[in-house]
Image (spheres, rainbow, N blue to C red):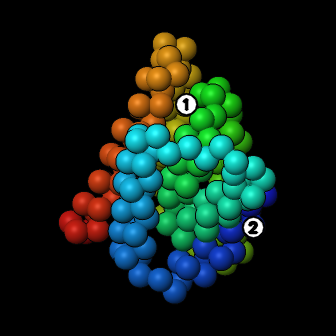
């Protein structure tokens, strides 16, 4: 998955430059809603294997550098595979770390960093670590069924918010 994510990032940079951001955000959000509903109704990706891993990774990488919303394809894929929560969390963490570092390098090489980027990153970093600590503390109190429900709620919530942002601006 991580290799696919890194492989998809250059294409995501092209998408960033060529495709209308609002249109792309709307398409992604509608797909997230569709696939979340399908997963909640029993869709499973049992035979996805290495091709599925690669496809989810590439799509995640494209979205990381084009929209910064790399999570949905990977989350939907892992949810569809029925990945146990501990493996799910470890996979997401590893892919996001590697992908985030590679995205920073890609944006840097493309000349996309500004002073505001560094300031925003510095301000957000403590909140990221705080969220990680809170998530780790709460994780042991959540059973697998509730974990899966929470993932679906977060997917739907983020998709609805993305749609609202397209129309609100």
Q: On the image, numbered disc 1 is attached to which residue? A: 132
Of 108 and 115, which appears nearest the observer?
108
**Which is in the foreground here, disc 2 or disc 1?**
2
Q: Which mark is residue 38?
A: none
> In the image, is 41 to the left or to the right of 98?
left
Dot 1: few (<14), some (14–19), or many (≥20) neighbours within 10 Å?
Answer: few
Image spot of residue 163 (x, y percent) = 29, 62
Of 157 and 111, which appears nearest the observer?
157
Dot 2: few (<14), some (14–19), or many (≥20) neighbours within 10 Å?
Answer: some
Residue 100 vertical placement versus 126 (above, below) = below
Q: CA distance from mark 2 to mark 1?
A: 27 Å
Image spot of residue 50 (x, y percent) = 78, 53
What residue sits 41% from the left and 40% below the top?
40
Residue found farthest to the top: 141
> In the image, is 146 to the left or to the right of 105?
left
- Say which quadrant the C terminus sits in: bottom left
Of 82 and 125, which appears nearest the observer?
82
> In the image, is 1 to the left or to the right of 89?
right
What residue sits 69% from the left and 51% below the top?
48
Q: Is residue 69 visible?
A: yes
Q: Secondary structure at mark 2?
A: helix
Q: Is residue 125 visible?
A: no
Residue 42 vertical placement versus 111 (above, below) = above
Image spot of residue 123 (x, y percent) = 48, 47
Q: Secondary structure at mark 1?
A: helix
Query: Which quadrant holds residue 41?
Result: top left
For marks 2 and 1, the one nearer the N-term is 2
Q: On the image, numbered disc 2 is attached to which residue? A: 7
What residue sits 50% from the left and 58% below the top?
69
Residue 159 vertical placement versus 154 (above, below) = below
Image spot of residue 98 (x, y percent) = 73, 50
């Amino acid at each position: 998955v991580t290799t696919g994510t890194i492989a998809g990032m250059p294409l995501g940079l092209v998408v960033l430059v060529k495709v209308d951001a609002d249109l792309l955000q709307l398409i992604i959000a509608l797909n997230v809603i569709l696939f979340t509903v399908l997963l909640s109704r029993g869709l499973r990706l049992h035979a996805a294997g290495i091709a599925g891993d690669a496809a989810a990774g590439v799509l995640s990488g494209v979205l990381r550098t084009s929209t910064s919303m790399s999570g949905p394809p990977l989350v939907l894929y892992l949810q569809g595979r029925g990945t146990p929560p501990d493996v799910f969390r470890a996979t997401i963490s590893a892919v996001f770390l590697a992908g985030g570092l590679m995205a920073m390098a890609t944006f840097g090489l493309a000349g996309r960093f500004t002073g505001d980027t560094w300031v925003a990153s510095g301000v957000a970093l403590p909140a990221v670590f705080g969220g990680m600590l809170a998530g780790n503390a709460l994780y042991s109190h959540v059973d697998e069924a509730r974990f899966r429900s929470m993932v679906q709620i977060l997917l739907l919530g983020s998709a609805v918010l993305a749609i609202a942002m397209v129309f609100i601006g």
